[in-house]
Amino acid sequence: MIKMMIKEIELEGLTGPLAGLEAGYSKGSPLVCIHGWLDNAASFIPLAEALPSCRWICIDLPGHGKSAYRPPGAIYHYLDYLGDLYRVLESLECSSCTLVGHSLGAGIAAVYAAAFPEMVDRLVLIDGIGPISHDSMDSLKQLRESLDFLGKTGKTGSRFYPSWDQLVKRRLDAGNITRKSVEILLERGTIRSGEGATVLSDDRLKQRSPLYMSQHRVVSLLKGIEARTLLIMAASGLIRKRSSTLERVAAIRNLTQKIVPGGHHVHLDDPDVVAREIKKFLDDDQGEA
């Protein structure tokens, strides 16, 4: 029986240090994990507990969890996260790795794997496949809304909520996720104070992206992925019924697709189901080697 190890780590990011967690086996090629929007590194701890023989490196993206915020005046643009991931892999000094991403993190991991195929051996995407795209004609409206967020509100920093239960309920109301999963994320993403808690994530994360890529551009990027790829889609998740998903799946040449029961946070709600698929994927790769 392998004893589970979890420790806090600090890695280099694009605009400041990034906090994270290292879990599981302390040697070998890492599984570098990138969480979803407004989540944090703890998102992957249930998976690590289900697969303790792997080396898990789970990062808090800038403005999330315990990581530093972007500097004043900066925004959290999707493409900048690629720079953060580049710095993380540099600081880990690993020649190659497996990238594991959920939702926003799956988009980051997919584009990074396409841009730097020599650095990514395998790719695991959990209920996400590439960044959000938008092909409509409301780009100008979107740009104005994005700039208005900074110009009118200037919101930044953490927020205090006087009731822990109300904070949990607010997160539960935002999506299909269990209370246990919410509390895993909030325990890392908040500081408790009496009956309330301070949410650590930067409020600027709620700013709408100034511009989205087109579906055509996303597909062209996904075609550059060379790594063996596992896509785990939740049956009641966000991407299974999207019209864009089928074209994106077809763009990745060496992709295995699995549909598992559950919602968007299935890796948190039912980690054993997701861990089994990841283990099969990793074991098959070792068999081919």
Image (cartoon, helix red, strand yellow):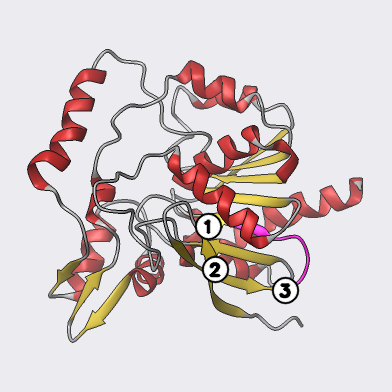
Say few, some or many: other residues with alpha carbon within 10 Å of mark 1 (under 14 / 14 to 19 / 20 or more): many
Identify the residue position indicated by label 2 in the image: 46
Check if residue 27 falls in the magenta segment.
yes
Identify the residue position indicated by label 3 in the image: 25
Say few, some or many: other residues with alpha carbon within 10 Å of mark 3 (under 14 / 14 to 19 / 20 or more): many
Residue at the image position 74 percent from the left and 31 percent from the top: 254
Residue at the image position 46 percent from the left and 35 percent from the top: 239
How far apart marks 2 and 1 lie (CA) works out to: 8 Å
Residue at the image position 26 percent from the left and 19 percent from the top: 139
Left/right placement of residue 6 relative to residue 164 reads right
Boundaries of the magenta span? 25-32
Query: Is residue 57 placed above or below 8 in the rendered structure?
Result: above
Question: Residue 153: percent from the left, percent from the top?
Answer: 10, 46
How far apart marks 3 and 1 lie (CA) works out to: 20 Å
Main SS, magenta residues: loop
Check if residue 148 falls in the magenta segment.
no
Query: Is residue 174 placed above or below 247 in the rendered structure?
Result: below
Identify the residue position indicated by label 1 in the image: 267
Number of numbered markers: 3
Q: Do callouts 3 and 2 mark residues in contact (Cβ within 8 Å)? A: no
SS under mark 1: helix
At label 3, the amino acid type is: Tyr
Residue at the image position 41 percent from the left and 66 percent from the top: 181
Question: Residue 69: percent from the left, percent from the top?
Answer: 33, 58
